[in-house]
Image (tube, rainbow, N blue to C red):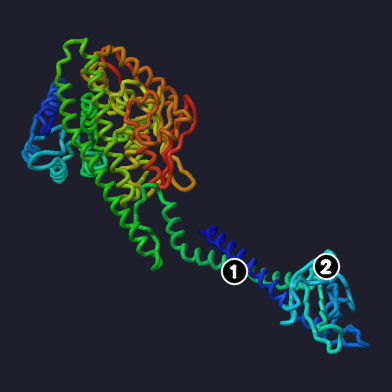
Amino acid sequence: MLAALAAILLLGAAVLSIAAWQYAALAARDAYDKLLMGGAVQIAENIFLQGGVVTLDPPAAAIATLSAYDLVFYSVTDPRGIVVAGYGDLTLSASPERLRQGVVLEDGRYQGQPVRIAGLVRKVEGAPGDGWTRIIVAQTLGARAALTSDLAFKALAMIAVMSALALATAALSMRLVFSPLTRIEREIAGRQPDDLSPIALTPPPEARALVEAIDGFMLRLRERIALMQRFIADAAHQIRTPLAAIDAQVELLEEDDPAQTAQLEGLRSRIAELGRLTSQLLDHAMVLHRARSQHRTPTDLNHLAKTVLSRAVPLTLDREISISFVPLEEAPLLDVDVISVGEALSNLIHNSVVHGAHKRLSLAVERTADGVALRVRDDGPGIPISDQSRLAMPFQKGATSTGSGLGLAIADEVARAHGGALRFEGKDGDFSVILEVR
Amino acid sequence: MRILLVEDTQEIGLAVQKRFERIGYAVDWETDGRTASELIEVQPYDLVVLDVMLPNMDGFTVLKHLRRRGLRTPVLVLTARSAVDDRISALDLGADDYLVKPFDYRELEARARALLRRAAGMADNTIKAGPLIIDRAGRTAMIAGAPLDLTRRELTVLEILASRPGAFVAKEELLEQLFGFDRDPSTNAVEQFITRLRRKLAATSVEIRTERGLGYQLVAP
């Protein structure tokens, strides 16, 4: 925008400059033409007849004025065509008839230099022939050029100053006009991706309609997303009921045939997976909603972590994993959403039980600079650094995972909703996933 | 052991009933919330397994009434709804544990056993035996203030022994508590757990003794 304005101003300045140059040249020519004509007339007036011969008494003052910066040439030719004074080869192109009507001015060259030539004729009574004596005065163009440049450069300087002022004014007014937009832009750019709340700015009158339109759009988007989340939650819930019935049917099957036991076990674990997927879909949909609404209550994170740990590790876990819990000495009280933090942590522990821990799993509550970290640590293979950021995205899962790929995404969202982050630490054999909340 | 099962989905009710009866518990199965609530008033139960979505009176209301009457019967809630929707309210209302449908029936059995053990002992959720403290709800153990790293089954063994300090616990009882009837593990498995527990308790003053023919005994100063 500003660049376009600058281009227009530059073009304007160029046109104006050319015009200014031409006006300056014209003004200088007019001024010096008057001097030249005056000089010519004075020379003409100093012509007299002496003994029947046309004679010139050169007017020193007039010639001095003309030759201040230039070379001045003149010639006086009597009616017979004999040059009686000055340079004999100085001529002009205008016809004698034209000269009789008044002073003629024209451009020409003399002694290799461009000159301005003034010519006139004067009737000298008693002179030989018809009495018409011709006077030509030529002047080089130095003074004119100097005046032209002087005038033109002053005009150009003014044009430049005015253009700069115009550009500055345009920039300033653009900034003034766009400053509310810039503030709105900054407000929107600085948001969490899931933040669809109204713009927290009192808009100036010019931008009010825009802000209202954006707010209205975000409101509709929010309602739409809420509806979709509600739909996902409902769908997941609806799936769960028949799934539980199928699971019960499997449970009711008699396991008489040992060949079928393995298949029943497979069926059970598939059902469990599907059940878990529905839970996570539901949680994923609801957690964001909860994080936005004010569900936070002062919570003892030692107690929360211990409760979640006790429930997240099944009593019937077939692998013998040592579970330890390391609370903070002083119970850390923090305003958190108990449900979403609990679910996030539960997902991390589940991941560790299923994919991580060989023999050890520990949950530690740790203090950070401005909050609390819940560290799930195990002796499993961990998550390769190359996969870490990817796995925090919904439906991304590790190479060996049979899960939904939502566990880490839920944990990550909960951490961010609580002003914290989900971090990974360590390596194969001693790996930690850390849920930070503030 | 007498258990009240309140569940209106036929298959699930049947499966839960079958599972509990197989391990020798008497199961009364109700499908109506209000009837169940009335039944609890007249008949004492060792455990109530309660579905949330019930005709006439939902599970939460049944639970609320039960607790309002001052009954401390352990309650395990079964829910098809989400964590985010109502797990917390179940626990807030005084449920002792919950499982989200579909659940693992072995896990249900293990949780029920844990709740029954808890109820059989003291009302308090911690067991103390000398320097040993077991937090049953949190499923953690500490000895002289330091956390003990135990597997779930090691903790179960320790919990059973510690809840009856000085008494002998038969190997078969431990076996049943550890594995239910699903698996057919040898009694060697119990010996393995005892050996591992002894190793983890080696540096402490808590000791597990074996008496041939009687079983195991926890001795704490």
Residue A165 is tagged as 1
Q: Is residue A169 visible?
A: yes
Residue B214 position by quadrant? top left
Three-letter code, disc 2? Tyr
Q: Residue furthest front?
A: A129
Q: Quadrant of residue A202?
A: bottom left
Camera-nearest residue between B22 and B33: B33
Q: Position of residue A197 (x, y in %)?
A: 34, 54
Residue at the extreme bottom of the image, as rendered: A125
Q: Residue A57: x and y, percent?
A: 90, 85
Task: Measure the alpha-carbon separation of dots 2 and 1.
Answer: 46 Å
Residue displayed at 24% across by 30% down: A275
User: For the residue marked with disc 1, what is the amino acid?
Assistant: Leu
Residue B86, compared with residue B157, is above or below; it is below
Examine the rendered structure and indicate whether residue A18 appears above or below residue B63: below
* Residue that label 2 marks: A110
Q: Chain of mark 2?
A: A
Q: Residue at x 14, y 39 (%)?
A: B53
